[in-house]
């Protein structure tokens, strides 16, 4: 395979809202590059990028896909990324390894929630950002309205480098504002170059002036020239555009139709001419594994080897594929590299470049390029592989915390181990998906970014590992405590022929401040009970605390003081005092005004301003307390505290309330007392469940 210099590589991530046409654009780019011989379609399930069973079935991108092609002597690595928030982990992984993010926007829908979110993520990763307005050929396309909305939302840096000739069903081609040439679309082959139609010359002048103004603002020398003459040469536009894009000050807007393959060759020209190569980036941020100190490594082929694994996929009949970007040096087959996170050495086997599921073996990957390993033993997503003589760990991807949890139930008994192994593999593929067993509620819970995310993971479990589960609501981990102070005796006495059992403990029970936990105090004086039996009383108390008296939930925030008791020189034992402590605790909590507590979570909901009222009303209806509000770009951030019991499937409700534009994060805050009428319902349900269990 041809070798490319680092300055001749372009790594581009396709981002945007779901259904804006990213996968269709990727398909058109591959076809135009000559990497494929046909133009696949998402609707027909034959695109290169969306190849998994779930993607074909649902007709949406679920996982990132690594693609590549050649254009004008440059290698283009295209990372096609999902558009739905449920798969935000894939977006985060892809944006970690590209220098440029190409935002795809539908000319019919304009700016949507996925536009906002992925734009922010791209900026956070330091990506240069370019924009492609897609579907300009559709009946209700609004190119100029979309362009105006982009300028309003992202500033004067969002500026056209092309405008369409015609719009909607009358689209004939595009006009390049840099070369000042018109390109008429043809059914097959490259667009035909021609002169600009006279009726569009005023529009061209208007948008070319805006382009020169935006470019000049990114460079002091150019702004002087532009202010003096009101004009920039084509060479100056090219240099200024390159610089402005790399600095994140200029966001060039191109247009076309991915499904018709219109405007794609012009777009590819712009990517190789203006998008930054890996060579122009600053050094890689990371840490020294030995000292833990922050260090950096230059992106260069002469530096010691560094490769970063950004995605792991388990493929049937292949094993584990590890997608990586070579950041320094080079990676060859059969080399030994250190994984500093796990302190193991990996022997690199076959190395591939990918086009969806199609693999092409390659002997070596140089810095700046993207490839895939097969069957690494211990390396997974977010791991670094490096030269053993120069240890280095790349700063890992910061994956989103889960916002929803659902319980699972095996369809068949005995599948538990297979389910755990399968979900563990799926976690390696997507770290935003987590499975854990809740020892308290005895449920296995899977956590993710939304209901769709969890449904897809359950489908993947069945498809890849042959086991099925049902989803159900998770139980809430309630707690019990007391509000009153009481002194109580626990006396255990049993006589049965030989040696008896005798334990007698007097305990004082007192409530503690919320979140304090449990305290046990020994106040025995004068040897009323030998000190060797006191730990047994404490153990009995703690055992009884694990199942409260109201609904069987653990008792918390309790101070227990043992202040008196009695013993028998022959019949007393550790077991007897253990039982006495347990009896006293159960009896005392019943008489000390027991109450139920529920977990309360801190919630941050980020929503468009027009939906604030509806979202705040919904939070209040969930017994939530609004703690404050603040601006977050064009959105509003609502901070609240909401009981966990009211947050079931909240991500779905929030998206419904905000036309898909709102999202939220959550974190545990504290436990607080449940309102009386709700507590009664919970206690009644617990008692009924206990009765049912006895009958079974």
Image (tube, grey):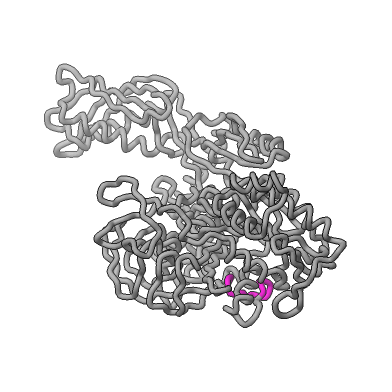
Percent position (x, y) of residue 588?
A: 37, 26
Quarter of the image with the N terminus is bottom left
**At x 76% / y 60%, what residue is drawn?**
163
Residue for point 57% across, 37% down: 681
Q: Nearer the viewer, residue 147 or 683?
A: 147
Q: From what the image shows, is residue 520 above or below residue 463?
A: above
Query: Would you say 45 lies left or right of 383 here?
Result: right
Residue situated in front as seen by the camera: 460 or 696: 460
State yes or no: residue 43 in magenta: yes
Most distant residue in the front direction: 228
> Is residue 253 shown above or below 412?
above
Q: Residue 584 at what x, y percent from top left?
A: 32, 28
Q: Is residue 625 above or below residue 16?
A: above
Counting from the top left corner in percent of width and height, residue 216 is at 64, 48
Q: Is residue 622 visible?
A: no
Give the magenta part as a residue range: 41-50
């Amino acid at each position: 395979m041809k070798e490319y210099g680092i300055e001749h590589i372009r790594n581009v991530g396709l981002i945007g809202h779901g259904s804006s046409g990213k996968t269709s654009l990727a398909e058109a780019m591959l076809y135009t590059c000559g990497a494929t011989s046909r133009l696949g379609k998402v609707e027909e399930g034959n695109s290169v990028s969306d190849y998994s069973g779930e993607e074909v079935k649902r007709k949406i991108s679920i996982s990132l896909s690594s693609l590549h092609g050649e254009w004008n002597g440059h290698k283009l690595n295209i990372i096609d990324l999902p558009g739905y928030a449920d798969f935000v982990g894939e977006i985060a992984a892809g944006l970690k390894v590209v220098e440029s993010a190409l935002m795809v926007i539908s000319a019919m829908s304009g700016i949507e929630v996925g536009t906002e979110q992925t734009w922010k993520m791209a900026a956070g990763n330091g990506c240069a950002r370019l924009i492609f307005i897609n579907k300009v050929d559709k009946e209700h396309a609004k190119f100029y309205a979309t362009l105006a909305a982009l300028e309003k939302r992202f500033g004067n840096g969002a500026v056209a480098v092309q405008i369409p000739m015609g719009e909607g069903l009358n689209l004939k081609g595009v006009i390049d504002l840099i070369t000042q040439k018109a390109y008429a679309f043809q059914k097959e082959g490259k667009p035909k170059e021609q002169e600009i139609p006279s009726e569009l010359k005023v529009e061209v002048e208007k948008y070319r002036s805006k382009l020169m103004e935006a470019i000049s603002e990114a460079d002091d020398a150019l702004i002087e020239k532009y202010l003096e003459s009101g004009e920039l040469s084509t060479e100056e536009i090219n240099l200024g555009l390159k610089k402005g894009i790399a600095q994140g000050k200029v966001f060039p807007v191109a247009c076309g139709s991915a499904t018709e393959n219109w405007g794609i060759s012009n777009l590819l020209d712009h990517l190789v001419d203006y998008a930054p190569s890996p060579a122009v980036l600053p050094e890689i941020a990371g840490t020294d594994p030995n000292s833990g100190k922050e260090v950096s490594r230059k992106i260069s082929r002469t530096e010691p080897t560094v490769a970063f694994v950004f995605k792991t996929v388990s493929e049937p009949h292949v094993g584990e594929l590890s997608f990586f970007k070579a950041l320094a040096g080079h990676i060859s087959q059969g080399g030994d590299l250190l994984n500093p996170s796990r302190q193991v050495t990996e022997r690199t086997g076959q190395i591939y470049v990918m086009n969806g599921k199609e693999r092409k073996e390659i002997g070596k990957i140089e810095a700046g390029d993207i490839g895939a390993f097969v069957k690494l033993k211990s390396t997974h997503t977010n791991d670094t592989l490096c030269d053993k003589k120069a240890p280095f760990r790349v700063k890992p991807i910061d994956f989103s915390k889960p916002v929803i949890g659902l319980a699972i139930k095996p369809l068949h008994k005995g599948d538990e181990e297979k389910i755990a192994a399968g979900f563990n593999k799926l976690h390696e593929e997507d770290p935003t998906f987590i499975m854990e067993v809740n020892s308290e509620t005895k449920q296995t819970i899977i956590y993710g970014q939304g209901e769709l995310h969890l449904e897809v993971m359950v489908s993947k479990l069945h498809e890849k590992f042959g086991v099925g589960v049902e989803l159900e609501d998770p139980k809430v981990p309630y707690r019990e405590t007391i509000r009153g102070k009481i002194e109580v005796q626990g006396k255990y006495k049993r006589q049965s022929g030989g040696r008896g059992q005798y334990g007698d403990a007097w305990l004082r029970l007192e409530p503690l401040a919320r979140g304090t936990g449990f305290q046990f105090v020994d106040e025995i004086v004068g040897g009323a009970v030998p000190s060797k039996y006191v730990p047994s009383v404490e153990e009995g108390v703690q055992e009884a605390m694990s199942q409260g008296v109201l609904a069987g939930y653990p008792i918390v925030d309790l101070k227990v003081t043992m202040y008196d008791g009695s013993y028998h020189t022959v019949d007393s034992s550790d077991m007897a005092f253990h039982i006495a402590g347990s009896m006293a605790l159960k009896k005392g909590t019943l008489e000390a005004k027991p109450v139920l507590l529920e977990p309360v979570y801190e919630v941050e909901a980020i929503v468009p301003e027009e939906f604030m009222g509806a979202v705040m009303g919904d939070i209040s209806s969930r017994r939530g307390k609004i703690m404050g509000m603040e601006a977050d770009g064009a959105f509003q951030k609502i901070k609240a505290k909401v009981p966990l019991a009211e947050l079931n499937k909240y991500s779905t409700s929030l998206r419904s309330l905000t036309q898909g534009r709102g999202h939220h994060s959550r974190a545990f805050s504290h436990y607080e007392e449940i309102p009386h009428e709700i507590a009664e319902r919970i206690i009644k349900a617990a008692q009924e469940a206990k009765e049912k269990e006895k009958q079974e």
